[in-house]
Structures are given as C-alpha cells and as structure tokens.
Amino acid sequence: MAFVQPTLSVPTSRLQESQDLLHSARSAGDYLPVQKPTKSFWIDSPDANPLATEGSTGFLPAAADICIVGSGITGVSVAYHLATRFTREEPLRVIILEARDFCSGATGRNGGHLTPNAFIDFSTLEAKYGQLEAMKALDLESHTAKGILEFISSQDIVDEVDLVAGGHVTMFVTDDEFCRAQKDYHAARAAGVDLSNVEWLSKEEMYSIYGVPYPGAKYGGHNLWPLKLVTYLYNYAKFKMPLSLHTSTPVSTISPNKVGSPHRWKVHTPRGSVSCSYVVHATNAYASHLLPHLRGPSGIVPTRGQVMAVRASVPLDQFKGRSSWDANDDFEYWFPRPVTTISEHPLVILGGGREVESRFEYGEIDDSKCSEVVSKVLRDFLPGLFRGKFELGREPVMEWTGIMGFTSLRDPFVGPVGDLDASSSHDSNYKGQFIAAGYSGHGMPRAYACGEVVATMILAETRGESWSAPKWLPHHYLTSQIRRVNDNQTMPSK
C-alpha cells in the first residue's frame, strides 16, 4: 500500500529529554494564579460556568471543620466524597476557597479527556515499584472513570456534560514509541491485566480507517465537558451537607490557631480568616505557595499547557468515529466535539506542542498568555496529519493555556502534608493538613479518586478510626512513601 506521508509539525522522541529537564526544573518561587487568564472554551463559552463568582462577595464564614483550597476536580471531589459519606450525626461544615473563578485552573483548561490508562508505562512502573503497584496504578484510573460514569448515569446528565463514549486511539509516530508500548502491553498481560478491549491496528489498518500511516492501539475511553461535570459534583455535595464556596478568595497563608481554640488552623485571605481543623491542599501546580517545601523538582513543578479549539473542514462522518486521540508520547491529544447534525463540521479540541519549547514550559506560571511557537505548531498539527480534513492556516475558534503540576515521579502526592517535609514533624507542624496534587498532565483519570482518598482519611480521623487504603490505590502515591521513592528506594512488596 502506498502511503501519503503526513507532515508532523512537532518534534518527536523528546520524552526522555523532558524527563531529564524536569529533574532540574527551576523553582517558580511564591506565586498565586495570575489574574485575567486566557479564555478557555470550557469556561468562557456562554452559560458554561454558573458558579463562576459564587461567594466572591458578602459573608465569609469565620470557622469551618474542613477548608478545601482549590475548586477544581480534586477539591470538589473531596467535598463530594465527604458528602456521600456524611451523616447528620456528624455535622461537618465544609468550605471551599478559590483564588479566581470557580474551576478556573487546570480542570477548566484541559483537553476534556476521560481515558483511563490501559497499559502504557506498565513495564516502567513494574520495574520501579513492583507488579502489584503497577496494576494498582491502572486500577485507580479505572476506578476514577467508573465512579464518574456512574455519577453521570445516576444524575441522568449525559447530555448536560457532553459525555461521549467514543473510545480512544493512541498513535505511535516512532518505532521506539511503538516498541515501548508493545513491551508495556505484554508486561501488563503477563501480570493478568484484562486487555480484552485493546485492539492493535497496523499502519496499513490505521491508514485505511483514519488516513494516517502510523500503527496504533484502540481501547476504551470517553470525553466530556470537565467544568460541567465538576459543577454537578459540587451541587450534589452542597445538597447533601453544609458546604459553601467562596471564589476570588485566595489563601495567603495558613497559621496555627491560638492555644485553646477548637480549631487547629487559621486560613488567611484578603477577605478575612477562616478557622478550621482540617485543610486540604487541592491547588495542584500552586501547592508550593502555601507549602514552600514543595518548590523545585523534588516537589511540584508548574508547567504550562496549551490547548485550542479548531473547526474541521469536513463533517464528522469523515472522521470514522468519535474517538479521542493521543500521539507522540502523549505530548499531543485531541478529540472531536459532539455535533447536532451529521453534516456539521466538528470543533476539535487539540492540546500539546510544549515540546517545541526549550524547557518544555516547566516553571511557567502565566496562563494569561499563549506561547507563539506552540501556537504555530498546534495550528499546523492537524492539517499536516489529516490531509484534507483541516485547513492549513485557519485560525482557531479559541486558544488558551493552563498550568499543570508535574512531579519528578509523574505521579501525584496524596495524603498528610507533613510526610513530605523532611524538616517537620507531621504531628506538630502540619497535623490536619492533607494534599492531593501533582498529576503531571494526567489529572482527569486520577484526581477524582485521589480526592476520595483524602476524604476518607479525614473522616477516619474525625471518627477516631484507623484508615485503610482501598485496594485500588497505589501505595507509591501516598505522601508517606514519596520521600523513600525520591531517595531511589523501591517499594516493598505488598
């Protein structure tokens, strides 16, 4: 078969270089989200964010039992999972504080994918942490997708959140990328992972179906409108328990409360202070603003991602399905939005391109602007890959940036904050403070479950019970394990 060769606008084979640079990434210092960020399709489309300015003026409670800092999917997931376990006999008061508008951080600026990892990186995880931990890493993402899909179904909001069950295609643009994926697949299958939904497609099959001459793997996946999902989760939680949201309320510092106070902590904002017994750091890339020991490559490195919405030149039926995609070691990712008629040209959400920047956008905290060089390669990416389906030079409908939080392990930090600070005692310096952050560009399939973990940890403490890790939780996500792993110690067998 003769192939029409595509033109890739992005460099390939840069994954290892990006990882090496992450280990030496500069600290961004003390920072909060910038004001007037770029306009995101998810946030700034008409009527998309009814909670945008909720609680931004007026009364700010002086006290709460639990204060959640951050209103993205992690913070709202913590509130949701508290609410689903809430009983009237334990009148917990929960408050969410947000520096900007509701859900205006990475959750409101991402690519809209809900695709649990099927097998990618399995062999690397197995070598570092052991087979069971590698399997749990997949299990957590499956648990997240299952939980979100069950919530959407139970609330009958499939259309409201634009949920599409189109599957997912990973396309391998280099031989090395393909070989590593094959190795991961066989390692996962040997471990007993159910891979019955994975379909390998040769370059000939991919070209015949999609018009791209690269091999691929297709497996289960969804896409949706992330902000709308988080809005429904918040409203559900608010209906179930005492919960308030206060936007435009950045937290400046957290200090111990005075001796004799019924609450351990005082959370300071420009609008006043809130006393509370528990603090949840659900700020992802901005965690080091309140937790200075998380600055630098051993902590959470802010990393700017860039996304655009571009109109296709052909109807949806010429895309041969509604799959979401990723390629080039997951640097690029895209999917066609739902359409109302078969003849409509879909809007495609495309993200990526940061590998053209010399430092991969590590340390960048400003989402009020876009990178010009990233804009150029993103504009050229789909026209060069899918010949005839996108117009070269066509301006995107919208283009925006968001700040992700990367860790050197590329896995999140979940659990008590004090366990991450070698200079502190958890019982004294940070008791009652928890974190779930550092998703490394892969938050949608992980943040919901990590929020659940933190919620159950807090409830166990308030009830005087022992906390037990769920069977799907990788132990190497836990803050109690992170320092050992950073010291190049392998996980013990479980």
Image (tube, rainbow, N blue to C red):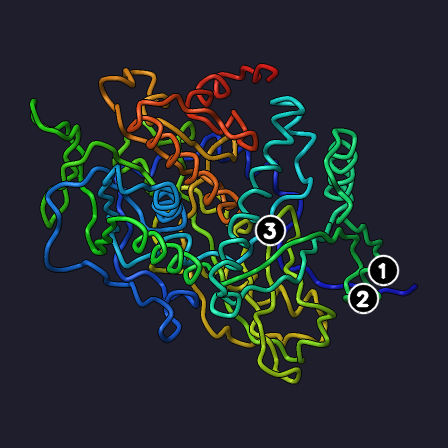
User: Is residue 152 placed above or below 71 in the rendered structure?
Assistant: below
- How far apart marks 2 and 3 lie (CA) works out to 21 Å
- Which corner quadrant of the image does residue 82 belong to? top left
| Rendering coords of residue 446 (x, y %) | 51, 42
- How far apart marks 3 and 1 lie (CA) works out to 22 Å
| Rendering coords of residue 212 (x, y %) | 77, 63
> Which residue is rendered at x = 46% and y = 24% of the image?
468
Circle 1 SS class: helix
Name which residue type carries label 3. Thr
Circle 2 SS class: helix
| Rendering coords of residue 145 (x, y %) | 56, 49
Q: Estimate how packed mark 3 is, as few (under 14), some (14 to 19) or many (20 or more) residues with alpha carbons within 10 Å.
A: many
Q: Are marks 3 and 1 in contact (CB under 8 Å)?
A: no
Whether residue 285 is visible to the viewer of this picture, yes or no, is: no
Q: Are marks 1 and 2 in contact (CB under 8 Å)?
A: yes
Per the image, the residue denoted by label 2 is 209
2 or 3: mark nearer the eye = 3
Q: Earlier in the sequence, mark 2 or mark 3?
A: 3
Say whether residue 24 is left or right of residue 122: left
3 or 1: mark nearer the eye = 3
Q: Could you tell me how many numbered marks the image carries?
A: 3
| Rendering coords of residue 473 (x, y %) | 53, 31
Name which residue type carries label 2. Ile
Per the image, the residue denoted by label 3 is 115
Q: Nearer the viewer, residue 322 or 394?
A: 322
Q: Which mark is residue 205?
A: 1
> Which residue is rendered at x = 48% and y = 21% of the image?
486
> Which residue is rendered at x = 26% and y = 23% of the image?
431
Q: Earlier in the sequence, mark 3 or mark 1?
A: 3
Q: Nearer the viewer, residue 151 or 189?
A: 151
